[in-house]
Amino acid sequence: QVQLVESGGGLVQAGGSLTLSCVAAGRTFSTLPMGWFRQAPGKEREFVVAIRRSGGSAMVADSVKGRFFISRHNAVNTVYLQMNDLKPEDTAVYYCAASSRDVAVPLLGAVLYDYWGLGTQVTVSS
């Protein structure tokens, strides 16, 4: 089992920045491909960004490309989501996810992730 706890959400004005953190426990963090997803009210959960287990290579949704950046620090079991130039349409609950798959690439689909945090709310005002 893997436990994931997100933090860092909040209310920010359009154009502002936030950094989300997700701390993992329960398995060797460096073996876990990690991702961030989000779900806005009345919408389905959507992929945001993902990073391979060793860091570096990432996949990014077109809607956030050039504004959102994922990173990880395996020594402290944490993955980060740096969000810049936030827009009202970025308002959502953001979820951290971990996959148990033994692959060395970032993973895109939500079905590929086995463990999920409870989410942290990000609200962007116009």
Image (spheres, rainbow, N blue to C red):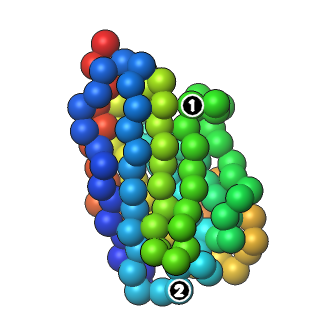
Q: Amino acid at mark 1?
A: Arg
Residue 93: percent from left, percent from top: 33, 43
Residue 88: percent from left, percent from top: 37, 20
Q: Amino acid at mark 2?
A: Thr
Quadrant in the rendering for residue 32: bottom right
Residue 104 position (above or below residue 48): below
Residue depicted at x 30% and y 21%? 13
Residue depicted at x 55% and y 74%? 74
Determine which residue is flagged by label 2.
Answer: 28
Determine which of the numbered discs, if any, sits on residue 67 in the image: 1
Residue 46: percent from left, percent from top: 50, 42
Quadrant in the rendering for residue 66: top right
- SS under mark 1: loop
Residue depicted at x 39% and y 49%? 20
Earlier along the polypeptide chain: callout 1 or callout 2?
2
Residue furthest out toward the left = 11
Residue depicted at x 40% and y 45%? 19
- SS under mark 2: loop
Judged left or right of residue 1, residue 52 is right
Find the distance from the CA under tag 1 to the CA under tag 2: 29 Å
Pick the residue in front: 83 or 33: 83
Q: Are marks 1 and 2 in contact (CB under 8 Å)?
A: no
Quadrant in the rendering for residue 121: top left
